[in-house]
């Protein structure tokens, strides 16, 4: 997508946001801590004028910062924006009297800004306040939080990093979004949904500190940690020390009659129950998609899920040229991945498993008998077959990794309590 397309999207934002809503009759956005070269382009004007501390931005005014320049903006609702160098940002302020809704948005064309939203300032009465940050590719809905928005010049690719609270990030052209929580980040391109959030690294936080004061970043991170500890304690009281085991997804080429995802989960339950160091497992036939929601639905702390990537029962022939002999054997193979989610600690433990068993070739009558039974450790015909043994070994591998995680976690807790 070229620059011309991105400009068209920005124009759409201006038309929809800027000219179809009633004017804002309150105060505007105040400029504070202007450093270096800061300029304003007033709505409808083509020229730029220097900006000073105390200047007010109104509906459809644009502010830009030059190299080695920055500014702090204060919105009437308590939103604060720290504007980085080489940034252009548009202000949108309007209100709808009938539903008492005040909309205070901003559009970042390029560059970066760091936003903090606190409680609304006194004097706004009973008005509801709607605040969003637009970019050429995304819409960020604010939920009382702090976060940064960085927009790449030319492509409009947007990176959103959250230091406290939660934001909802959507692609501006698609009704697809992601909730991004504190400590996580996402990226949005023009024709792609936001990427699944991933953890911010130390380098990401260090880069943020180069243009946002250390005290501000530290304060927001500490607020997040404080709230997180309170939430953690509340969840520990509410949740049971159990594992919800979701049927694994069949991502293999197998399309037979066995429910291999649900069957493997039953074998996994059977292996987990043998380990005293592992919390009690609970299998769920149907559950909500998100692991966190699944755990809360069953008041469990952990969710175990995954995917079967390979499942096959094949017959292979072998020719021994020295003995002039041909033999056939049957092979059962299974492989996949698993993820253990701890919703209290917000951690994910991932691992893989794979196993295979072989035996003299299985006749058609034996195969028919196997297929007539469910893939379950309680079915003796299955459990004693090469299929059952392969699945059992794979489940045992996954269980060993899970057991090691809980053993290490327990040792860490014992060390801290001494």
Image (cartoon, helix red, strand yellow):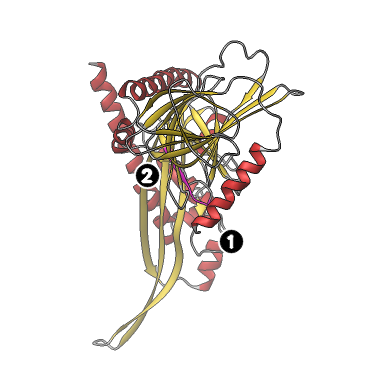
Pick the residue in front: 75 or 59.
59
Pick the residue in front: 410 or 22.
22
Say which residue appears at 26% left-offset and 27% top-offset. 411
Q: Is residue 191 visible?
A: no
Say whether residue 194 is left or right of residue 83.
Answer: right
Q: Is residue 149 above or below residue 218?
A: below
- Real-space CA distance between mark 1 and mark 2, rounded to the nearest whole angstrom: 28 Å
The residue identified by callout 2 is: 350
Q: Is residue 40 above or below residue 213?
A: below
The stretch of residues the image draws in magenta is 185-192
Q: Quadrant of the C terminus?
A: top left
Pick the residue in front: 161 or 402.
161
Count of numbered labels shown in the rendering: 2
First along the sequence among labels 1 and 2: 1
Residue density around tag 2, few if under 14, some if 14–19, many if 20 or more, within 10 Å? some
Q: Which image quadrant is residue 162 in?
A: top left
Residue 132: percent from the left, percent from the top?
A: 57, 33
Q: Is residue 152 visible?
A: yes
Q: Is residue 370 above or below residue 7?
A: below
Per the image, label 1 sits on a secondary structure element best described as loop
Residue 48: percent from the left, percent from the top?
A: 48, 38
Say which residue appears at 54% left-offset and 42% top-offset. 46
Residue 99: percent from the left, percent from the top?
A: 74, 24
Q: Which image quadrant is residue 213 in?
A: top left
The residue identified by callout 1 is: 257
Per the image, label 2 sits on a secondary structure element best described as strand
Pick the residue in front: 184 or 112.
112
Residue 314 in magenta stretch: no
Say which residue appears at 50% left-offset and 49% top-offset. 248
């Amino acid at each position: 997508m070229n620059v011309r397309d991105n400009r068209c999207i920005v124009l759409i934002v201006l038309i929809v946001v800027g000219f179809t809503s009633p004017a804002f009759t309150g105060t505007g956005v105040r400029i504070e801590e202007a450093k270096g070269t800061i300029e304003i382009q007033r709505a409808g004007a083509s020229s730029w004028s220097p900006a000073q501390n105390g200047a007010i931005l109104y509906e459809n005014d644009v502010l830009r910062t030059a190299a080695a320049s920055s500014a702090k903006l204060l919105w009437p609702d308590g939103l604060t924006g720290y504007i980085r160098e080489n940034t252009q940002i548009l202000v949108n302020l309007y209100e709808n009297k009938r539903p008492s809704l005040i909309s205070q948005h901003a559009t970042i064309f390029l560059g970066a800004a760091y936003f903090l939203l606190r409680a609304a300032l006194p004097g706004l009465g009973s008005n509801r306040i709607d605040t969003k940050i637009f970019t050429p590719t995304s819409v960020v809905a604010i939920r009382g939080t702090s976060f940064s928005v960085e927009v790449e010049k030319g492509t409009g690719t947007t990176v959103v990093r959250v230091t406290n609270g939660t934001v909802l990030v959507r692609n501006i052209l698609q009704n697809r979004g992601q909730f991004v929580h504190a400590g996580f980040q996402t990226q949005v391109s023009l024709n792609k949904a936001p990427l699944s959030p991933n953890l911010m690294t130390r380098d990401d936080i260090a880069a943020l500190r180069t243009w946002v004061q250390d005290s501000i970043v530290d304060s927001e991170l500490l607020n997040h940690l404080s709230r997180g500890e309170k939430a953690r304690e509340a969840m520990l009281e509410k949740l049971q020390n159990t594992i919800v085991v979701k049927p694994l997804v069949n991502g293999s080429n197998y399309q037979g009659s066995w429910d291999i995802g649900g069957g493997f989960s039953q074998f996994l339950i059977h292996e987990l129950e043998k380990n005293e160091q592992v919390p009690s497992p609970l299998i769920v036939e149907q559950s909500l998609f998100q692991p966190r929601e699944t755990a809360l639905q069953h008041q469990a702390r952990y969710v175990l899920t995954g995917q079967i990537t390979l499942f096959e029962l094949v017959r292979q022939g072998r020719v021994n040229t020295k003995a002039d002999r041909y033999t056939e054997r049957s092979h059962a193979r299974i492989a996949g991945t698993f993820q253990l989610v701890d919703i209290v600690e917000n951690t994910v433990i991932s691992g893989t498993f794979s196993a295979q068993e072989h035996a003299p070739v299985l006749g058609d009558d034996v195969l028919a008998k196997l297929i007539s039974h469910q893939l379950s450790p309680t079915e003796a015909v299955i459990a004693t077959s090469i299929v059952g043994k392969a699945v059992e070994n794979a489940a045992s591998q996954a269980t060993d990794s899970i057991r090691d995680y809980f053993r290490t976690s327990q040792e860490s807790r014992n060390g801290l309590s001494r």
